[in-house]
């Protein structure tokens, strides 16, 4: 039977539970254990796919096409194996499933209630991860203790600990220890109140992880331990890291959090091997220069909107022994001030994905600037579509080239839609294009930069888009010098484009950032940063 570790949070949101959960997962994996991860989101959306990026941040896409919380990105980057639909659940999905069963008569006329029907559904989602060979299942609850949305999950935890042997379950609670600058003191009372709230529900944490900007004194550790009913050695300090989030696992290892949990779960404590991780951190600490990369996006004001993009650039910097000097640019700023002004001095331009027509002219202007000035460029999803439109307008002479996505509904002009909705037979349709979600194959053409970067003929990358390069324009684009360097082997749809006689001008319909790892940078990001490092 698998062991279960539950991670909750208190005092404030955005404490970094996902990062901390992923870090503990890495430590356990580095001790030879098989770890599964699960994120529980209490909101009533079925998934984050329709949520505003300004509110929720990035939608992380799994291999099997699930639109999930961005914390699954932390899990993959740290623990190192692919997440799936089963690794993320929401209140919305749970309620929808229970209500559908009620409509089908599955409950034999019983009154359907939060307890036991919703709590049973929650516990069932945990048990789906339990299978032979899985040693520990780590389950993170989004939000903060005290939120009304999370009560059903906490109640399920309370029940679950009574249904399993006592050594099968461990609770980790993460809180904030604020520092009052005026008095020069750290305050433990918010943590005490948070744990008190948790204990009222019937959950007693075994480990407290305290986010802090200051070192926690032994006296304060003893105080927290006494009033929160945990052992002093189980009060874990997690200070803000100095230079990289990838320090967090090492910090937690030094606090022995993984050893504490293994002992709590009555498991042996095998030796740990973090050599590869430490080698990576050495490169982070000792960069051999900086590379200035501009990310021209639509949702720049919220950092989490492009979380995986920024992390993939960091990984590429590590692989190239350089620090990434990130310039975050709102596409609309380029529309107002001009690309030459905003992008002056950058060594690389990256245009990420997005939906809708807001800011696309700024993205197109940034791509034109990179193309004409031989600045390394990487386009992702909408970035590829904007690159095709830019090339069609300014090289092929199709002045009004556009994407159907940007055209007024009911007034789509197929004659200028170089990017369009396609059906399975590659026919342009005006409505109802199906989003491509999850991993799709791509055949890479010999002699291209993309093929050189990947080093193999066939790849699989994750997708999240509806619009495709219109096959009716492919020959015209190629006649004017655009290279189609990757196609889907089943539909022949364009997957990757590039330009010859340019240091690095590559764009992909996929989201390669989801497959990048700190110890294994994604090939496209790696070679993009290599080209940027060499740009002058």
Image: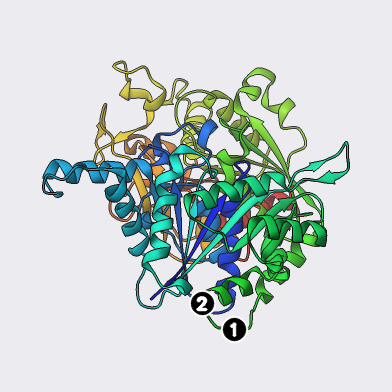
Asked whether 229 or 478 is in front, the reply is 229
Q: Which residue is mark 2?
A: 33
Q: Secondary structure under badge 1? A: loop
Where on the picture, by quarter, is residue 232? bottom right
Identify which residue, 465 or 111, lies in the foreground.
Answer: 111
Point out residue 324 in the picture as x, y percentages from the top left corner: 73, 49
Q: Quadrant of residue 258?
A: bottom right
Residue positioned 54% across, 39% down in the render: 352
- For image coordinates 27% across by 41% down, the residue present is 96
How are the colours assigned in the image? Answer: rainbow
Q: Is residue 95 left or right of residue 523?
A: left
Position of 491 relative to 371 (above/below): below
* Residue 109 relative to residue 45: left or right: left
Give x and y (percent) for residue 395.
Answer: 52, 31
| Nearer the observer, 352 or 391 | 352
- Mark 2, secondary structure of its residue: loop
Q: Position of residue 112 (x, y in %)?
A: 22, 43
């Amino acid at each position: 039977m698998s062991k279960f570790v539950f991670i909750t949070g208190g005092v404030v949101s955005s404490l970094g539970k996902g990062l901390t959960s992923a870090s503990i997962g890495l430590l356990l994996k580095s001790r030879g254990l098989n770890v599964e991860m699960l994120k529980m989101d209490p909101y009533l959306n079925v998934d984050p796919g329709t949520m505003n990026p300004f509110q929720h941040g990035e939608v992380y896409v799994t291999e099997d096409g699930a639109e999930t919380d961005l914390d699954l990105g932390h899990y993959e980057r740290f623990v190192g194996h692919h997440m799936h639909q089963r690794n993320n659940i929401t209140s919305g999905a749970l309620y929808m499933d229970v209500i559908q069963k009620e409509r089908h008569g599955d409950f034999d006329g019983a009154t359907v209630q939060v307890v036991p029907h919703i709590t049973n559904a929650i516990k069932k989602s945990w048990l789906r991860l339990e299978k032979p060979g899985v040693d520990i299942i780590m389950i993170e609850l989004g939000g903060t203790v005290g939120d009304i949305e999370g009560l059903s999950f906490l109640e399920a935890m309370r029940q679950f600990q009574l249904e399993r042997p006592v050594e099968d379950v461990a609770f980790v609670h993460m809180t904030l220890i604020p520092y009052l600058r005026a008095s020069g003191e750290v305050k433990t009372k918010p943590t005490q109140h948070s744990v008190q709230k948790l204990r009222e529900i019937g959950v007693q944490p075994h480990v407290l992880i305290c986010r802090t900007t200051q070192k926690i004194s032994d006296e304060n550790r003893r105080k927290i331990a006494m009033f929160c009913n945990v052992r002093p050695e189980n009060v874990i300090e997690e200070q803000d890291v100095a230079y990289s989030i990838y320090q967090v696992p090492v910090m937690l290892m030094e606090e022995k959090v993984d050893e504490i949990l293994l002992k709590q779960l009555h498991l042996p404590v095998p030796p740990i091997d973090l050599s590869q991780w430490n080698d990576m951190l050495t490169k982070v600490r000792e960069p051999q220069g900086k590379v200035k990369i501009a990310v021209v996006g639509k949702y720049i004001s919220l950092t989490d909107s492009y979380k995986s993009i920024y992390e993939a650039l960091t990984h590429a910097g590590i692989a190239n022994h350089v620090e990434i000097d990130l310039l975050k640019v709102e596409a609309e700023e380029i529309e107002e001030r001009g690309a030459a002004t905003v992008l002056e001095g950058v060594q690389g331009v990256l245009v990420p994905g997005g939906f809708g027509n807001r800011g696309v002219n700024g993205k197109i202007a940034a791509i034109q600037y990179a193309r004409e000035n031989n600045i390394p460029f990487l386009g992702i999803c909408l970035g590829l579509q904007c690159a095709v439109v830019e090339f069609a307008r300014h090289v092929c002479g199709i002045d009004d080239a556009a994407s159907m996505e940007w055209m007024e509904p009911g007034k789509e002009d197929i004659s200028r839609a170089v990017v369009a909705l396609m059906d399975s037979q590659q026919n342009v349709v005006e409505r109802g294009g199906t989003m491509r979600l999850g991993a799709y194959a791509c055949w890479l053409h010999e002699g291209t930069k993309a093929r050189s970067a990947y080093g193999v003929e066939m790849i699989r990358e994750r997708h999240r888009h509806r619009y495709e390069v219109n096959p009716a324009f492919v020959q015209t684009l190629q006649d004017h010098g655009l290279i189609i360097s990757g196609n889907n082997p089943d539909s022949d749809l364009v997957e990757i484009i590039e330009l010859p006689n340019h240091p690095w001008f590559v764009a992909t319909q996929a989201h390669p950032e989801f497959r990048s790892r700190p110890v294994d940078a994604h090939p496209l990001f790696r070679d993009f940063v290599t080209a940027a490092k060499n740009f002058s």
